[in-house]
Each structure stands twice: as C-alpha cells, then as structure tokens.
Image (spheres, grey):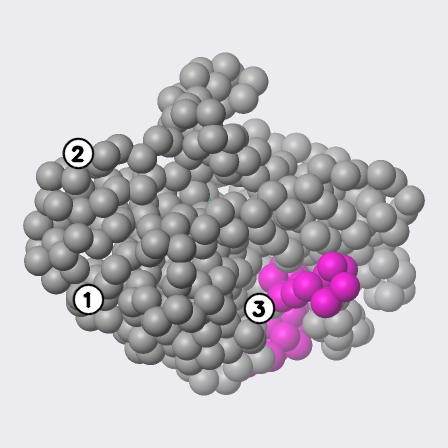
Amino acid sequence: MADGRIAVIGTGYVGLTSGTCLASLGHEVVCGDVDPDKVARMSGGEVPIFEVGLEELMQQGIAAGNLSFVHGSKEAARGAKYVFLCLPTPDGGDGRADLRIVHQVVAEIGPLLDPGAILVTKSTVPVGTAKEITRTLNRDDVSVVSNPEFLQEGSAVKNFMQPDRVVVGSDDRVAAEAVAELYSKLGAPTVITSAESSELIKYASNAFLAMKLSFINSIAGLAEVVGADVTEIANGMGYDDRIGNKFLKAGPGWGGSCFPKDTKALATIALDRGVSFPLLGATTVSNEEAQDRMADKVRESAGGDLAGVPVALWGLTFKAGTDDLRDSPALEVALRLDTEGALLRGYDPTVTADLPAKNGFPAIKAAADAYDAAAGAKVVVLLTEWPEFADIDLTKVAEVAPGAAIVDGRNMLDAERVIAAGLRYIPVGRREVR
Ligand code: UDX
C-alpha cells in the first residue's frame, strides 16, 4: 500500500481506468472531475464509458471505501501524496498537442499541494512537459514524474492489471521509484528513465504501432495487384520474433483517440527540433490511402458510380469492443462514400441513435441490426471487426439484399459461404473469389 493518498485528476478513459485499478490494488484513490453530473453518477457506481470489467471494479472500490469521486481538481489534490494528471491533450489543430487544460490544472492545484507530493503526468504529453510543469510549479518540495499509460480501449482494465511494462520517468529518482512502487503488486517489468525518455516512449510506441498498421495496409494494396494474400503474408512475417504477429491485420485504416493524434504530434515534435523523420508523415498518408482504397472497392462493387446507391455500413466505431467513434476509419470511409452520393445506413452494436452530421462527417441512419442495415443495399461494407459479423446469417442477408456485394474490410467472413449465399465477396488485400 502506498504511504499516502492518490488523487486522479480527470476521469476519461485513462483517468477512470487508472483510478479504479489503482484502488483495486489497495490504494486509497480520490478521482476529481470538472463535470458535477458525471461525478454524481460515478459516485453511484455508474461507469460513463463502455469498458469491459470496469463497472464491477469501480463498484467494488466504492463499496470497499477506498475509491471516491469529487467535483473539482483542488478537492481531489488537497492532501494527496500522488496526483495523477489524466487530462485531455487534444490535437491543437497544427499537429501539436494542446496542453492548455494540463497547465490550467497545474496552476490551480500547484499552490495547495502538500510538501513531498508527486505530480504524475499520465496523459500523453510532448517531450519536455515534465520540465515545463516543474518550472511552472516553482516548488522545490514537489516532484514531477512522467508515467505514460498504454491502455487499449476495450481492454483497458486488462492492460492496466497485466501490463507489458510500467514506464516511469523523472529526474528525481526517489520520486520515480515511489510511483513505480504503486504498481509493484502487478509484477510487471519496470522501466525507470529520464522524464524526456518516458515522454518519448509513449509517442514512439504509438507511432510505431501505427506505422506497422500502415505498412501492412500498404502491403494489402500491393497484394491485391500482384495476386498475393495479405493474411498469408502477415502469417509468414509474424513468425519472425523480431516482427511479431500482432498488429498485422489489414483493414480500412487505423484510428481512435491516440494513434492519429500521437503520430502527428510526434512528427511535429521532430519537425520543431529540426529532426528529419519522414516515416511519420508517410504513416499518416498511407492510412488515408487505405481509407481511399476501401471507398474505391465500394464504388467498384457498385459498378463505378455511387450516386444514389444504397450502401450498408457494418460497424461504425474505430474498432470493436468500444463505443468510441473518435477518428474512426469507418466514418472516414463513410465520408468518402457520402461525398460520392451513396445513401448510407449503418449498424453498430454500440450505436443506437442516428448519427447527426458532425465535424464534416455525414449523417448516418442507424439500423436496428446488421440485416436491417443491409436491407435493399447494393453494397455492404464491413468496417469494424465486431465478432458478431463473423456469425452473420448470410442467407438472411441475401434475402434482404439480393445479389449485393459484401466488401469485407476486415477479412472476417468466409468467402465460400458468402458466395454460396448468392452474394459477391470482396476482401481486402487478397484476391476476390468468384
Ligand atoms: C492505442 C494503443 O494500442 C494503446 O497502447 C494506447 O495507449 C492508446 O492507443 P486504442 O486507441 O485503444 O489503443 O486502439 P488499438 O487497439 O491500438 O487499435 C487502433 C486501431 O488500429 C483501430 O482502428 C484498430 O481497428 C486498428 N487495428 C489494430 C488494425 O486495423 N489492425 C490490427 O491488427 C490492429
């Protein structure tokens, strides 16, 4: 048990998961948020996000008395030994992370922190932020430590409880070790570094994974042209330990709240320092091309023109296991199809209401299920890898959308079965089976 209370400021995906999991390790945790309604709901054990296993753990923590929620950052930080900053760091519009919220909170809580308190940056922040916070704080008796999260939406609790590694960075070794100690029960490899290395480890990890995905998606494009199969290629590559078999599934591009923002932010960090890093720009461009190729497939399946063509979208979230639509490749593809005049109807297990037009993205009518979405469609495009799509009744699809083409953007369906049902099957990165 830590010899002091933990405050978590910000209860988004990262803050709520981290706070709840730290409490489940036995620490005393108080989470603060600016939204009083959300605080009231969380205090009643309600989880505002869709995250496997989180609600149960949160309710256990509240019942055990070592997890609570308060309104405001000052209320949470007062008297705490560890203060985790889990605040949004959105894209500032120029590729740089916008740190205004982080700085505002530091200014608010700085003067009231207890001597010996440790301020921990958990949000993804640019290199140099720990130093900058140290300067703004201007307190010799408070340490600043970087402790990036590596949580995947949909498996955040598992990622927290069984981490591949815990990374802690600071110029104050004692403070870094104290933060690492909070995770000691997990028995994970612990990497203690400088603050700058720790901050860069987070960006480097996310950008590397995004690059791996862009690479396999470009290989998929090439495979289609030369008559190869991207799933066979990924399998053959993955046996090499140095490459690994994870993150090699081709698809409609990658998205989410981290990869797009962090890849751009790292590119800007390098650019600002005059360091050439062309892979990062190419990673983003390749991703846009993967989305373009998916839209191309839909257009070709419709006979070359999408104007007035009913198209069903299976899956809208940026990946399965989450209700998050932020930077979703499915919506990027939808935007391309809408621009060409397609009539879109979408189904996603987590989307129950019609999506309004927002931030340049088109309005999408929400169907009750995959069959409802497919009814009358000329093309069905599978965009998010929800497991239920693998078990879809293809005969039923053929009944509601006779002769439709299925563009399988995640290579989830069995070609023979689709064709046997009387539908056309267009996979990604492999030859179309006729
Ligand atoms: C990511 C990182 O994995 C996590 O460590 C970090 O803390 C936050 O960003 P997340 O945004 O939840 O997590 O998504 P992730 O599971 O990594 O998937 C990102 C995107 O890549 C999704 O759009 C997903 O569909 C896509 N993807 C992933 C593929 O297209 N193919 C794959 O093989 C794996």
The reply to whether the C-beta atoms of the residues labelled 2 and 3 are less than 8 Å apart is no
Residue type beneath disc 2 = Glu
Q: Secondary structure at mark 2?
A: helix
The reply to whether the C-beta atoms of the residues labelled 3 and 1 are less than 8 Å apart is no
Residue type beneath disc 1 = Gly
x and y percent of residue 176 in the render?
71, 43
Tell me the number on the disc at residue 416: 2
Residue 213 lies in magenta, yes or no? no
Tell me the number on the disc at residue 10: 3
Residue shown at 68%/63% (left/top)? 91
Q: Earlier in the sequence, mark 2 or mark 1?
A: 1
Distance from label 2 to label 3 (Cα)? 49 Å
Q: Earlier in the sequence, mark 2 or mark 3?
A: 3
Where is residue 355, by image quadrant? Answer: bottom left
Q: Nearer the viewer, mark 3 or mark 1?
A: 1
Q: Nearer the viewer, residue 153 or 286?
A: 286
Residue range (magenta):
68-97
Distance from label 2 to label 1 (Cα)? 22 Å
Residue shown at 29%/67% (left/top)? 310
Q: Earlier in the sequence, mark 3 or mark 1?
A: 3
Q: Secondary structure at mark 1?
A: loop
x and y percent of residue 180 in the render?
62, 41
For label 1, count other residues whose C-alpha is less than 10 Å away and answer few (under 14), some (14-19) or many (20+). many
x and y percent of residue 151 in the render?
50, 48
- Residue 103 lies, with reference to residue 116, above or below; the image says below
Q: Which residue is mark 1?
A: 376
Q: How many tags in the picture?
A: 3
